[in-house]
């Protein structure tokens, strides 16, 4: 069993997340002047590795986008792959969403009553899948001061409202040559500017959702970053959190808590991948006013025993798990059990996120069975707004990362008064 590591589980539909198998520009410039939006006008950084095809054996952008699309090429009605067809090229795409494929007219007709319920959303899914490439591509330097959060930022709408020159920044991305390059090679028609603009905005929320959700966790537990340096552990971190992650990717936390005393975010999980943030957790306090990312590849309870208890790494002020998925099947729960019990018994303030209400209920039930004290659960105002399709069966409602959160702290018994201690009857 591997706490927080073995997802996606085969027994549960998990939204497709771009894995290391997808061609994504490997080289991203790291700079301190990261654009406050989390993406940059793309023109300054040519992703050389992709252009030369050295990483994935891809020679041209067109081939790269084709290869990305290959993953989605199967008939959604009869599930046939192109290879199983007399003519692999006979696979046809739904013109409306540009997302799902059919082996022929018969399958398309048979599928329409179901597909028509999801076609519109799947169009956004397909669009975001392509535009995501821009977010991971070049990162130009932007010297404009990053906006600091005011006290009234309650959700993405507020967040966008506080961004200076939002329209100019979006305009630069839409008019940039990488956007042109994208649609010249995507093999799909370029959508209208308004649609593209919304797509870029959704991807910006997707990019910032994790750090901001950590910030939300700090707020929920009343942990005060201005009072002392903080350590946050991300349990069950995998390639989703660590692939191509740069040292500056969680800087939004600094804008969220201006003047903080220093924060370290440690990614812990057996599926953590090597990269810029693969560096040992700090034993001493992190740099004041900065966010420091580090990683540990391994099980959380091993990390705890080998590093936290031995004081090689700091004890966490907050533990966060993005879609731990322990509700999904008994095997996963078994893998997570040592971690869940550790979090409970050491009374560590913990925040987990889930994809939907169903997962929320199932996770809450398990936490109740483990007698943890759940201190809150609700829709996450900083959930990703990017829709993701359930990979092998697209005709389902798309999922959104970190849609809901669950906060828990310690064992249930610690706070629940025993019957004998209750005073009188308050009436409710
Ligand atoms: Zn078919
Ligand atoms: Zn469609």
Image (spheres, rainbow, N blue to C red):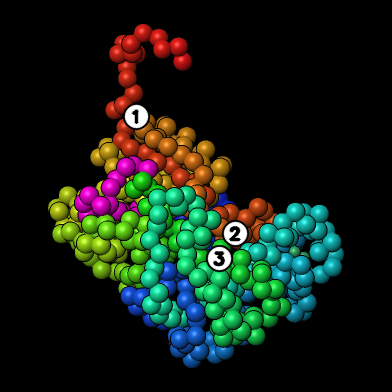
| Image quadrant where residue 194 sits | bottom right
Residue topped by disc 1: 412
Q: Residue at x 40, y 57 (%)?
A: 149
| Closest to the observer, 255 or 276 | 255
Asked if residue 76 is positioned above or below residue 54 in the image, the reply reads: above
Numbered disc 2: secondary structure: loop
Mark 1 within 8 Å of ligand 2, using the beta carbon: no
Observer-nearest of 29 and 340? 29
Q: Position of residue 36 (x, y in %)?
A: 42, 69
Q: Label 2 crowding class (10 Å Cα cut-off): few <14, some 14-19, many 20+?
A: many
Horizontal relation, residue 406 to residue 175: left or right: left
Q: Secondary structure at mark 3?
A: helix
Q: Nearer the viewer, mark 3 or mark 2?
A: 3
**Does 179 sit above or below residue 289?**
below
As drawn, 6 above or below 334: below
Cα separation, mark 1 vs mark 2, equals 35 Å
Question: What segment carries the magenta color?
Answer: 220-236
* Mark 1 or 2, nearer chain start: 2
> Viewer-proximal residue, 195 or 404?
195
Q: Residues within 10 Å of mark 1 (few under 14, many from 20)?
A: some
Residue at the spot of label 2: 387
**On residue 201, which mark appears?**
3
| Disc 1 to disc 2: CB gap under 8 Å | no
In terms of sequence position, does the residue under pointer 3 or pointer 1 come before the other? 3
Calculate the distance from the C-alpha at mark 3 to the C-alpha at mark 1: 40 Å
Residue 302 showing in the rendered view:
no
Which image quadrant is residue 269 in? bottom left
125 in magenta: no
- Which is in the foreground here, disc 1 or disc 2? 2
Marks 2 and 3: in contact by CB < 8 Å?
Answer: no
């Amino acid at each position: 069993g591997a706490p927080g590591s073995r997802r996606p589980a085969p027994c549960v539909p998990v939204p497709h997340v771009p894995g290391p198998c997808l061609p994504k520009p490997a080289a991203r410039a790291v700079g301190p002047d990261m654009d406050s939006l989390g993406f940059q006008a793309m023109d300054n950084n040519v992703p050389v590795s992709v252009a030369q095809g050295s990483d994935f054996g891809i020679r041209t952008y067109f081939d790269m986008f084709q290869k990305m699309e290959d993953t989605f090429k199967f008939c959604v009605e009869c599930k046939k792959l192109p290879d199983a067809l007399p003519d692999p090229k006979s696979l046809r795409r739904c013109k409306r969403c540009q997302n799902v494929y059919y082996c022929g007219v018969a399958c398309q007709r048979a599928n329409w009553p179901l597909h028509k319920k999801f076609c519109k959303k799947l169009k956004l899914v397909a669009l975001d899948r392509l535009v995501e490439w821009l977010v991971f591509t070049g990162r130009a330097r932007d010297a404009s001061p990053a906006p600091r959060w005011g006290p009234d930022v309650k959700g993405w709408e507020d967040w966008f409202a506080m961004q200076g020159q939002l329209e100019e920044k979006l305009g630069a991305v839409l008019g940039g040559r990488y956007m042109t390059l994208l649609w010249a090679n995507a093999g799909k028609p370029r959508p209208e500017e308004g649609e593209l603009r919304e797509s870029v905005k959704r991807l910006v929320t997707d990019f910032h959702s994790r750090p901001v959700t950590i910030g939300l966790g700090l707020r929920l537990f009343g942990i005060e970053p201005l009072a002392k340096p903080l350590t946050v552990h991300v349990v069950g971190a995998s390639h989703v959190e660590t692939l191509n992650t740069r040292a500056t990717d969680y800087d939004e936390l600094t804008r969220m808590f201006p003047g903080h005393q220093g924060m370290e975010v440690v990614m812990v999980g057996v599926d953590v991948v090597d990269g810029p943030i693969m560096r040992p957790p700090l034993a001493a306090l992190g740099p004041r006013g900065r966010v420091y990312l580090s990683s540990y590849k391994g099980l959380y309870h091993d990390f705890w025993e080998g590093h936290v208890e031995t004081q090689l790494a700091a004890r966490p002020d907050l533990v966060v798990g993005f879609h731990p998925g322990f509700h999904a099947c008994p095997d996963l729960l078994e893998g997570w059990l040592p971690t869940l019990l550790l979090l409970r018994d050491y009374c560590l303030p913990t925040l987990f996120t889930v994809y939907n209400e169903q997962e929320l209920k199932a996770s809450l039930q398990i936490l109740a069975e483990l007698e943890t004290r759940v201190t809150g659960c609700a829709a996450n105002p900083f959930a990703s707004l990017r829709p993701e399709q359930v990979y092998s069966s697209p005709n389902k409602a798309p999922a959104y990362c970190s849609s809901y959160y669950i906060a828990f702290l310690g064992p249930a018994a610690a706070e629940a008064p025993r019957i004998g201690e209750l005073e009188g009857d308050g009436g409710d």
